[in-house]
């Protein structure tokens, strides 16, 4: 399969060799984990991409999930190109699109009463932590083990390079996460104890469990966690960077019927256009990051030359408009749900120990059944290590025409039933090889 991969992709190989000479990241790639070099992609439409060698793939990576509408969305791109003829940005001034985008976020996400745009999901999480600290006058942020909230120093305390056992906190002095408190994601008693220790500004969480649901939560977990946080005067921040445009209209908090104090958004909010991040939530809290507080607490600075720039704001406005058009996101979720059923049928008939499940348009394929993922803390590292084994199965799937970060896949509103047939066929090939 590796030889086949190399035979099909000589131009990607050549570009990768050049990249290694000039890009600090040239020797690093993660998609897919086990290929000898990353593919260079040339163009795409809907759920499909074509690489620089002309190979076609159903794309289930979607720029790390950022393409909520799929590649090259014609309406969105036409709107942004029209705007480009007029203006690109007016930092230091406001633009109508920033207002329109914020209005739309408030319309779509129940927890959003006011919005602050920033440059990425990571920045949104940093902003949320800063706002929470400013608002509460407290220092600690409680983070669930294994949850990802961007690469800010304070969040780099427990994140492992998948399967390697190496922690990713090189270059981060430990005092930078001295106020980050880790708790096990399924233990409300751990959370209660951490809150009771005092000085907690906020609890931050991914909605469906670490890394978009690797280890899902029990049904009413957030409800109880929010109540506990509030009991102790702490805020609850829901990181909707992935789920905001994938869980369903209004994000995971709408789907789960919970009310976090702050949400963070990114990725799919602008369908792949850059400078994509926002923090939103209760007005009185967000305004803690405004122009100083009447009670004399210090001014809370959140910056970014490109934060809320015209093109990003317009992309956000149009993306949310399209995403919330009746039937658009729902049918993408239906395509994902149907794909899960078909994959599980394939896996069980083929006798391979894979399990597919989904949260909205987030598709996960794991080596552990979802109910078994609600596990004791002790088994978490084992499950994460096991997942790394999935990388070994990647190449046949890619050779069969599907780009997948197996276990952490995404569909978009551009994916059709025909695309999902191609995904089933690619996995059928893998099952055959394993059989
Ligand atoms: N939060 C979550 C849940 C994420 O998955 C990610 C990105 N993988 C981020 C935050 C960071 O977003 P960005 O890469 O835009 O900084």
Image (cartoon, rainbow, N blue to C red):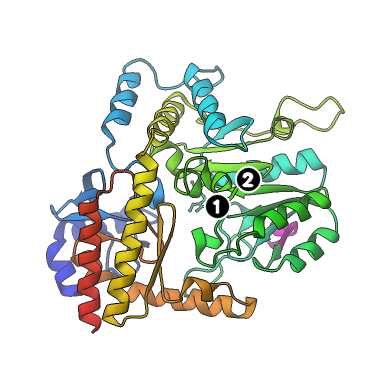
- Residue 67 appears in view: no
Could you tell me which residue is drawn at 57 percent across and 30 percent down?
106
Residue 33: numbered disc: none
Image quadrant where residue 159 sits: bottom right
**Quarter containing the N terminus:** bottom left
From the viewer's perspective, tell me whether residue 217 is left or right of residue 397: right
Q: Where is residue 118 in the image (x, y as percent from the top left)?
A: 55, 35
Q: Position of residue 11 (x, y in %)?
A: 16, 56
- Assess disc 1: are there few (<14), some (14-19) or many (≥20) residues with their C-alpha within 10 Å of its C-alpha: some
Q: What whole-number distance in Å separates the C-alpha atoms at marks 1 and 2?
A: 8 Å
From the viewer's perspective, tell me whether residue 365 is left or right of residue 17: right
Q: Which of 266 and 320 is in front in this view?
A: 320
What residue range appears in magenta? 174-181
Give the secondary structure at mark 2. helix
Q: Label 2 near label 1: C-beta < 8 Å?
A: yes
Relative to 218, is 57 above or below? above
Asked if ligand 1 lies within 8 A of label 2, the reply is no
- Residue 210 appears in view: yes
Q: Where is residue 76 in the image (x, y as percent from the top left)?
A: 33, 30
- Assess disc 2: are there few (<14), some (14-19) or many (≥20) residues with their C-alpha within 10 Å of its C-alpha: many
Could you tell me which residue is drawn at 30 percent across and 83 percent down?
351
The residue that label 1 is drawn on is: 150
5 inside magenta stretch: no
The residue that label 2 is drawn on is: 126
Give the secondary structure at mark 1. loop
Asked if ligand 1 lies within 8 A of label 1, the reply is yes
């Amino acid at each position: 399969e590796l030889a086949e991969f190399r035979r099909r992709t000589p131009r990607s190989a050549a570009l990768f060799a050049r990249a290694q000479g000039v890009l600090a990241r040239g020797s690093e790639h993660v998609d897919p984990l086990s290929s000898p070099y990353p593919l260079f992609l040339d163009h795409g439409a809907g759920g499909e991409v074509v690489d620089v060698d002309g190979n076609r793939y159903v794309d289930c990576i979607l720029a790390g999930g950022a393409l909520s509408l799929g590649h090259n969305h014609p309406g969105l791109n036409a709107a942004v190109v029209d705007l480009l003829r007029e203006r690109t940005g007016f930092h230091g001034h406001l633009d109508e699109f920033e207002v329109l985008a914020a209005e739309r976020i408030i319309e779509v996400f129940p927890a959003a009463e006011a919005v602050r745009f920033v440059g990425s999901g990571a920045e949104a999480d940093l902003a949320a932590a800063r706002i929470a600290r400013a608002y509460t006058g407290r220092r600690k942020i409680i983070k669930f083990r294994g949850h990802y909230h961007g690469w800010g120093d304070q969040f780099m305390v427990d994140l492992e390079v998948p399967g390697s056992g190496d922690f990713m906190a090189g270059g981060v002095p430990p005092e930078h996460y001295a106020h980050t408190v880790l708790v096990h994601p399924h233990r409300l008693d751990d959370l209660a104890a951490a809150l009771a220790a005092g000085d907690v500004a906020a609890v931050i969480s991914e909605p469906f469990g670490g890394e978009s649901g690797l280890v899902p939560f029990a049904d009413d977990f957030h409800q109880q966690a929010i109540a506990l946080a509030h009991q102790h005067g702490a805020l609850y921040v829901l990181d909707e960077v992935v789920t905001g445009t994938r869980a369903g209209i209004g994000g995971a908090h709408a789907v789960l019927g919970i009310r976090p104090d702050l949400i963070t958004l990114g990725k799919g909010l602008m369908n792949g256009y850059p400078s994509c991040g926002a923090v939103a939530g209760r007005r009185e809290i967000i305004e803690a990051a405004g122009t100083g507080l009447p009670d004399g607490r210090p001014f809370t600075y959140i910056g970014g030359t490109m934060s809320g720039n015209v093109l990003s704001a317009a992309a956000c406005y149009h993306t949310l408009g399209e995403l919330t058009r009746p039937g658009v996101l729902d049918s993408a979720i239906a395509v994902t749900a149907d794909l899960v059923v078909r994959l599980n049928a394939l896996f069980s008939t083929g006798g391979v120990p894979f399990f597919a499940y989904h949260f909205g348009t987030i598709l996960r394929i794991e080596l552990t059944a979802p109910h078994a993922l609600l596990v004791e803390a002790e088994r978490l590292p084992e499950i994460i290590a096991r997942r790394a084994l999935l990388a070994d199965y990647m190449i046949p799937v890619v050779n069969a025409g599907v780009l997948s970060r197996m276990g952490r896949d995404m569909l978009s509103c551009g994916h059709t039933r025909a695309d999902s047939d191609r995904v089933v066929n690619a996995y059928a090939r893998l099952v055959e090889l394993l059989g």
